[in-house]
Amino acid sequence: MIQHRNLNGLRMFQHTARLLNFRHAADALSLTQGAVAQQIRSLEADLGVQLFHRHARGLSLTPQGQTLALGIGPALQQIDAALSAVTTVTNTLSLSVTPSFAAKWLGPRLPTFLSKHPELDLQITADQGVSNFSSDGIDLSVRQGMVPKQTDVEWYFLGSHNLVAVATKELLEQFAPETPLSDYPLIEDGHRPWEKLIERGSIANNARMLRVNQTALALDAAERGQGVALVPACYLDPSHDTMVVLDHVIPEPDGSGFYLVWPKNRPRTAAFTAVQSWLIDGFKAR
């Protein structure tokens, strides 16, 4: 029988089985990669089976790992429900956001919010993947894209992306004012906003591109003068007057934007209401 001390190991296994990467699981849990790998090794030792095949560029589940992954979600959900039933604590909330949203929107505003709500225990997970509310222990999630299609969630449309092309003054001074976007060096992130514009014929397909995997990295590169980034307007810091928004109209699909998502029938605790209201009001004020 598995020992009680490995309940944390089971939770780490759950994240690792979903992401199939120790580093990504560690990032999602705000732990080190070594800590997650050690817990998985300890879990495998206690069970006496190998749960993952280790590869040079990631992991894959063994048959035993697949069996455990299929059954562990409902079990951990029952444990969490039982713990919630015997505690009166309502000031804890787990919030999942994308890494770029965490860095460029949430981070700058978080100190002010927490100073107004010192009673809250807010646990933030920055994860690119879509939250699985039934297995990840997430209470509330901010996601970027189209309308959520899951039938077991509720959602609120926070606002459209309002994508804007931004660059430094120094970079723009190297080009004539009427220069088309495709003639600038462009910075592409994992959402592929420039490529989507090219596919729709909105800009010419002759652009030079620097490619990064996150919007926050694209904006950082633009601030260093490496090119023009296409980012949500809410990620811009108004105190940085070195950045210029180019005077171009950026078309977006209807319904594309930021969504606040949570599981259906989730209890409206004080923590849930406070964080939900903060996020909604924050987007209205931008």
Image (spheres, grey):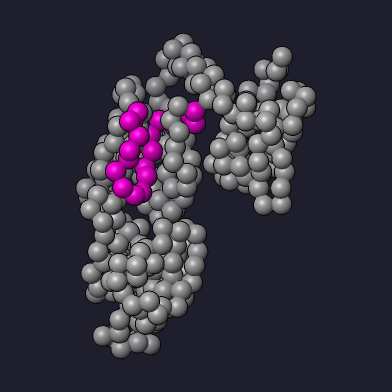
Q: Nearer the viewer, residue 80 or 239?
A: 80
Q: Residue placed at 44% from the left, 67% from the top? A: 188
Q: Residue placed at 25% from the left, 73% from the top? A: 248
Number of labels in the image equals 0
Q: Decide: is 235 above or below 258.
A: below
Can residue 271 be seen by looking at this rendering? Answer: no
Residue 145 sits inside the magenta stretch: yes
**Residue 184 image offset from top left, x and y in percent:** 38, 80
Name the residue at the top extreme. Answer: 86
Among the 4 quarters of the image, the one containing residue 65: top right
Q: Decide: is 6 above or below 143.
A: above
**Residue 263 image offset from top left, x and y in percent:** 36, 28
Residue 150 sits inside the magenta stretch: yes
Q: Residue placed at 45% from the left, 33% from the top? A: 132
Can residue 200 be seen by looking at this rendering? Answer: yes
In the picture, the quarter occupied by the N terminus is top right
**Residue 278 image offset from top left, x and y in percent:** 29, 40
**Residue 253 image offset from top left, x and y in percent:** 26, 56
Query: Which contiguous range is marked in magenta?
Result: 135-153
Q: Residue placed at 41% from the left, 78% from the top? A: 207
Among the 4 quarters of the image, the one containing residue 115: top left
Looking at the image, residue 216 sits to the left or right of residue 245; the answer is right
Looking at the image, residue 244 sits to the left or right of residue 217; the answer is left
Q: Decide: is 164 above or below 281.
A: below
